[in-house]
Image: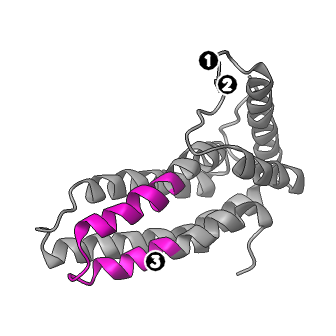
């Protein structure tokens, strides 16, 4: 499936999730190795999706909102499952986590990302691409501190502008749903 450039980096990271799903099925792979992949690759990936994509989906069309609710619930479920993973986890627990992770990635790739791409116009997608490149994983949307601890108002203005752009784009493209956010 041809992915819009704004989502290509996230889509590529899904490969790591599928590799992890396969490794979960191999009981020779220790839990600490699995958790290192989770903590260093996939958990930051989920945080980016939570920060950048879930807000988009929450103010979209009804089908996009339903998908987004499922994705957010999956993220919480996966965090909980990986929080309990250790070397004593029985094979069926590892298989359950593996299946859930693989199912989640397939849902994002086959349904959620295409729904987001369909909801946003070209300009909003290109702004999303820049945000995904510029925003470090640890940044808090709407607020950023520089090295001296002062508020970076340029960054905050850009964040606020981003939200307004997305809300406007979603409101324009989702004309038949009852929920319309007004830019702040």
Disc 1 secondary structure class: loop
* Residue interval drawn in magenta: 16-45
Quickly name the residue at label 1: 149
User: Label for residue 18?
Assistant: 3
Residue drawn where x is 76% and y is 28% of the image = 155
Describe residue 159's horizontal placement relative to residue 138 as left or right.
right
Residue 103 or residue 93, whichever sits in front: 93
Tag 2 or tag 3, which sits nearer the N-term?
A: 3
**24 within the magenta span:** yes
Foreground label between 3 and 2: 2
Against 22, is 176 above or below?
above
Residue drawn where x is 55% and y is 40% of the image = 138
User: Label for residue 96?
Assistant: none
Binning the other alpha carbons within 10 Å of mark 2 as few (below 14), some (14 to 19) or many (20 upward) gives few
Q: Residue 33: image x %, image y %?
A: 31, 69
What is the C-alpha distance between the residues marked 1 and 2? 5 Å
Disc 2 secondary structure class: loop
Against 97, is 70 above or below?
above
Q: Quadrant of the N terminus?
A: bottom right
Quickly name the residue at label 2: 146
Residue 150 or residue 127, whichever sits in front: 150
Residue drawn where x is 65% and y is 27% of the image = 144
**97 within the magenta span:** no
């Amino acid at each position: 499936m041809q992915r819009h450039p704004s989502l290509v980096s996230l889509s590529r990271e899904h490969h790591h999730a599928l590799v992890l799903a396969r490794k979960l099925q191999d009981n020779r792979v220790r839990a600490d190795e699995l958790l290192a992949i989770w903590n260093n690759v996939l958990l930051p990936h989920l945080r980016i999706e939570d920060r950048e994509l879930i807000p988009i989906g929450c103010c979209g069309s009804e089908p996009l909102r339903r998908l987004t609710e499922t994705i957010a619930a999956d993220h919480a479920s996966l965090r909980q499952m990986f929080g309990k993973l250790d070397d004593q986890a029985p094979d069926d627990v590892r298989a359950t986590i593996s299946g859930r992770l693989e199912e989640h990635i397939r849902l994002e790739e086959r349904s959620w990302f295409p729904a987001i791409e369909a909801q946003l116009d070209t300009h909003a997608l290109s702004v999303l691409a820049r945000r995904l490149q510029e925003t470090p994983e640890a940044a808090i949307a709407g607020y950023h501190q520089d090295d001296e601890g002062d508020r970076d108002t340029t960054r905050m203005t850009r964040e606020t502008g981003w939200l307004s752009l997305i809300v406007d784009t979603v409101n324009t493209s989702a004309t038949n749903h009852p929920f319309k956010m007004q830019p702040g």
